[in-house]
Image: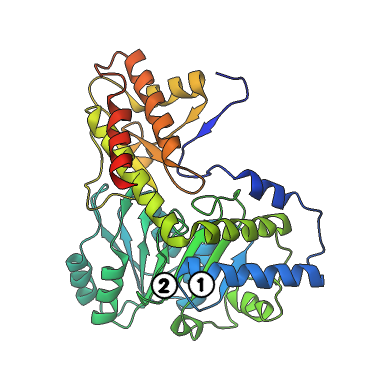
């Protein structure tokens, strides 16, 4: 391979398009200038359809984890009970955020690799009628599971008065946000996944019901969303923003508009289907069912013939291909293929081809080209 050639197929960070890089390389402007105010007003409006909302979308110069913490601490009074669905490492992180901040936290534990059942959530709500919020992970990055957020939100509203707080970090921009349609109270995402940007920004939107919960007594200074709400009225941020990244947001939103959001979502589903078909054709076991499978990341389980981390290391050294490994209880047991953001069906074919060659070199009995062929057939049938 070429010395500087790399292929980033992890579920974040993801590749950044050249035109976005060029936009971020524009001359710096003052973050309190009229030029920035115009830019920020524009990008804030452009984010709304991506979230599926008419509500404001706040931009934080911080990681997705910070935005998740802001989601909880700004809308749930200290000491009130929350329910957190934990079906992977990031559901666990959401619960850890709550516990660290002193919230009585009930964990609804779900087998890793499976989505949560709306009926199980209903039962949990009935067992904990005093819960003030339910925290859900739209797309569990660590397993490649997409939870049925619309159905789950419906159950919450049907059986309680709790707020619905959703971690959409690894999928918003690649799947419909549907925030208003699903009656989500808080939706969060980050810049470095399906949003096609470098790490460093996160985005938060609140329903009118969640906005009514905001108070001036928030324990956090930097993550107090009242400050962001006030400054957004002036097309500004309360503290110094990552100006270059926000210039990139404008270009990303323009790219999505040109492609159309419907096609963006269709492309992600197509890449999911191609990836899963290719992996299955190679005889490798997938972690998730078809029903639960994520459009942005696919998890592949180990077999007796290979160790996922050995395969990842070989592919990195030989081809410059970056795949992700397992986390926590799945560490060393799976590898994960990211197919989100600036990624196309051709990238999936290239990735499957490299995986085939790596498996062959590790002594796994496969037929070269079989996985690529299966993915090609899915593509031809769907375009």
Q: Is residue 143 visible?
A: no
Judge whether residue 51 can be spotted in this image. yes
Q: What residue is drawn where x is 38% and y is 25%?
A: 353
Question: Who is closer to the viewer here, 198 or 249?
Answer: 249
* Image position of 50 with respect to 284: above or below: below
* Image point (54%, 58%), residue name: 258
Look at the image and tell me in which quarter the N terminus lies: top right
Distance CA(mark 1)–CA(mark 2): 9 Å
Mark 1 neighbour class, 10 Å CA radius: few under 14, some 14 to 19, many 20 or more:
many
Q: Residue at 23% of width from left, 68% of height from top?
A: 121
Is the residue 203 above or below the residue 334 in the image?
below
Q: Position of residue 298 (x, y in %)?
A: 34, 42
Q: Which residue is mark 1?
A: 205
Dot placed on the residue nearer the N-terminal end, 1 or 2: 2
Marker count (numbered)? 2
In the image as oriented, which residue stretches furthest toward the bottom? 212
Q: Badge 2, how many Cα within 10 Å: few under 14, some, many 20+?
A: many
- The x and y percentages for residue 145 are 31, 51
Residue 357, label in figure: none
Residue 270 against residue 132 in the figure, above or below: above
- Could you say whether the residue bearing mark 1 is in a helix, strand or loop? strand
Q: How is the image coloured?
A: rainbow
The answer to which quarter of the image holds residue 81 is: bottom left
Q: Does the residue at mark 1 contact the one at mark 2 (Cβ under 8 Å)?
A: yes
Q: Position of residue 51 (x, y in %)?
A: 47, 68
The residue that disc 2 covers is: 179
Hey, which quadrant is residue 161 in on the image? bottom left
């Amino acid at each position: 391979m070429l010395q500087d050639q790399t292929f980033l197929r992890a579920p974040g960070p993801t590749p950044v398009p050249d035109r976005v890089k060029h936009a971020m390389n524009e001359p710096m402007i003052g973050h309190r200038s009229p030029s920035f105010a115009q830019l920020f007003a524009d990008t804030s409006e452009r984010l709304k359809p991506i979230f599926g909302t008419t509500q404001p979308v706040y931009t934080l110069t911080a990681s997705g984890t910070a935005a998740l913490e802001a989601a909880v601490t700004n809308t749930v009074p200290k000491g009130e009970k929350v329910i957190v669905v934990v079906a992977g490492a990031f559901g666990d992180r959401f619960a850890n955020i709550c516990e660290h901040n002193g919230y009585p936290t009930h964990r609804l534990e779900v087998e890793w690799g499976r989505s949560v059942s709306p009926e199980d959530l209903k039962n949990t709500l009935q067992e904990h009628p005093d819960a003030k919020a339910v925290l859900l992970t739209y797309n569990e990055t660590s397993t490649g599971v997409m939870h049925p957020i619309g159905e789950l939100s419906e159950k919450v509203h049907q059986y309680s008065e709790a707020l619905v707080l959703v971690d959409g970090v690894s999928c918003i921009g690649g799947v419909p946000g549907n925030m208003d349609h699903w009656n989500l109270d808080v939706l969060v995402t980050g810049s470095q996944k399906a949003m096609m940007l470098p790490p460093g920004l996160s985005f938060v939107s609140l329903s009118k019901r969640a906005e009514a919960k905001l108070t001036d007594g928030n324990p956090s200074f930097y993550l107090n969303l009242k400050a962001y709400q006030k400054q957004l009225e002036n097309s500004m941020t309360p503290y110094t923003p990552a100006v270059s990244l926000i210039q990139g947001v404008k270009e990303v939103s323009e790219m999505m508009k040109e492609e159309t959001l419907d096609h963006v979502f269709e492309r992600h589903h197509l890449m999911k289907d191609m990836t899963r078909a290719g992996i299955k054709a190679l005889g490798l076991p997938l972690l998730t069912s078809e029903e639960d499978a994520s459009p942005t990341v696919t998890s592949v389980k180990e077999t007796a013939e290979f160790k996922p981390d050995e395969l990842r290391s070989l592919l990195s050294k030989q081809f410059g291909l970056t795949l992700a490994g397992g986390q926590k209880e799945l560490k060393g047991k799976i590898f994960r293929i990211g197919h989100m953001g600036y990624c196309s069906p051709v990238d999936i074919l290239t990735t499957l081809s490299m995986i085939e060659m790596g498996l062959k070199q590790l002594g796994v009995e496969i037929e070269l080209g079989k996985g690529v062929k299966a993915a090609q057939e899915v593509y031809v049938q769907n375009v």
